[in-house]
Image (spheres, rainbow, N blue to C red):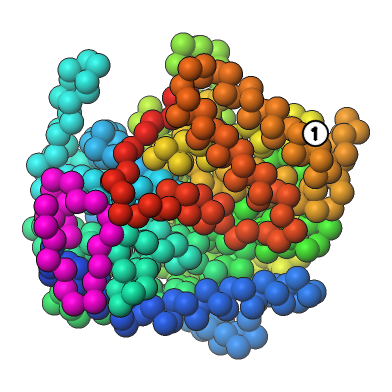
Amino acid sequence: MTLIAPSGVEVLGHLEPGYGDILTHEALNFLAGLHRRFEKRRQSLLRYRKERQAELDQGALLMFPHETADIRAGEWTVRPAPADLQDRRVEITGPVDRKMVVNALNSGAKCFMADFEDATAPLWSNLLDGQINLRDAIRREIDFTDEKSGKRYQVNDDAAVLIVRPRGWHLDERHVHINGHALSGSLFDFGLYVFHNHAALKERGTAPYFYLPKLESRLEARLWSLVFQHAEDELGLERGTLRATVLIETLPAAFELDEILYELKDHIVGLNCGRWDYIFSYIKRLRSRAEHVLPDRSAVTMTVPFMAAYSRRVISVCHRRGAHAMGGMSAFIPVKGDEKANAAATEQVRQDKLREVKNGHDGTWVAHPDLVPVAMEIFDQHMKGPNQINRPADPHELPVTTQQLLAAPEGDITDHGVGDNIDVAIRYIAAWLGGRGAVPIRNLMEDAATAEIARAQLWQWRRFDKSTKEGTAITAAFLENKIADICAAIQDEVPGQDELCDRIQTAADILSALVLSDEFTEFLTLPAYDRITAELKAPMRLMEFED
């Protein structure tokens, strides 16, 4: 297959049948326009992240910005949500593979967040196939036949509203270069989706909707606002056609909620409590402070004070500004073949969703179709309208303070917690290298965010010379040996599968480098992406990790 790219555009990924329909000359030209207009600003904002982290490492405090006090004090609201985003009580999330797209759209959820980010490993084939799958789903031309059962799946007429999550600002798409520089992964995912689908979505009475991940500040929200305006102008769309929900999944962003809504007020619909990335960000941004060391990952729930404060703040700010305050994801998933364990997992999800709706959230996330009715029942019972935006605020509730947002929870670091973090991180990274971004591990759905918590905690515990409750000193030597032992144990589960064993070893090597380094690596997906893009011009084969 031959691809005729615009001047200055180079496509390094291999071209499979159908890819040329996505990477058209016009679409690549649209991407090039996005890159040339916004790449300098993106790089400037990434440098600002590093500068801000250096200040935090030197003792600076996170606080509500003085220079935007008038925005926080002002009386203003965002543009009302479009009709098909008024009721978002249950949203299902997942990767963009064909089977998931069909099943999620047919799940009975109000919305489906198709995820190019944490739930999708950025293999070139995953990204291009994902664009094809979404294009076909919108046009109701998608189907899927299960090879084992022979059952054929098609999208129902009453399918969930589609929302797409592109990758974060920090990630490149190295398979596409503009003027010799890698294109932003955010702009690649966003640009191809909106270019190919805005007209078909309009015919269906909807529009391109997005979840925007990992924003650190109002300035990063401003960049997305400018991108949205540029795309609308280039494609002849009315202002406000493109709509977004911003994930509040970084600690600095929690201090700029009003400002993020204000920057995107013509395009934003709401904010979402991305709890797992938020915990990771808490560790990452406060990594130089011993008083902020967290206990075992399993102990850091939404009920601990700093997480509860973050949720309350999202709800109060959103509702004051006329925006949805979306709840997050419980990691529990159905357990097949074990009725007792499945009942326990379902109850965990039920309690999580009950807490969210009673606190005032306007909707929630689930990761599996079987959990849609569980969450739906809770929200139907306790939220009679399409949302709770107009629910009166509690006059006795005090504003969330800086101290509440930063307070570390009590809890233990245990031998089990250390081992579980290592095991999950190795299994997840190995799966990610093989092309899977959402991985069920011991009845929990793990994605890049939960793996990030696991490796960040190991680094943090070693950095501050912590010991477990049982008395084990978490030293570099201990972690190095423990990683090797757990790696070997995982490899023993797949005897004779040399390729998979090699990938498990590579995952262990990446984890060791991350947790033993003196410097904290911003995202584990950065060194992992180096591995999967080492030979850009060689065809890459999607490999499955066997649970």
Residue 461 location in percent, x, y? 79, 47
Residue 36 location in percent, x, y? 31, 81
Instruction: Name the foreground residue: 259 vs 506.
Output: 506
- Position of 477 relative to 306 (above/below): above
Q: Tell me which amino acid carries mark 1.
A: Thr
- Position of 62 relative to 13 (above/below): below
The magenta segment: 1-23
- Position of 284 relative to 364 (above/below): below
- Is 22 magenta? The answer is yes
Instruction: Name the foreground residue: 394 vs 49.
Output: 49
- Residue at x 43% of width, y 81% of height: 41
For the stretch drawn in magenta, the main secondary structure is loop
Residue 210 location in percent, x, y? 33, 60
Q: Is residue 287 left or right of residue 219?
A: right
- Residue at x 62% of width, y 42% of height: 509
Q: Dot 1: what SS?
A: loop
* Other residues around mark 1 within 10 Å, as few (<14) / some (14–19) / many (≥20): some
Residue pointed to by mark 1: 414
- Classify residue 527 by image quadrant: bottom right
Residue 14 location in percent, x, y? 24, 51
Q: Is residue 161 visible?
A: no
Q: Is residue 522 visible?
A: yes
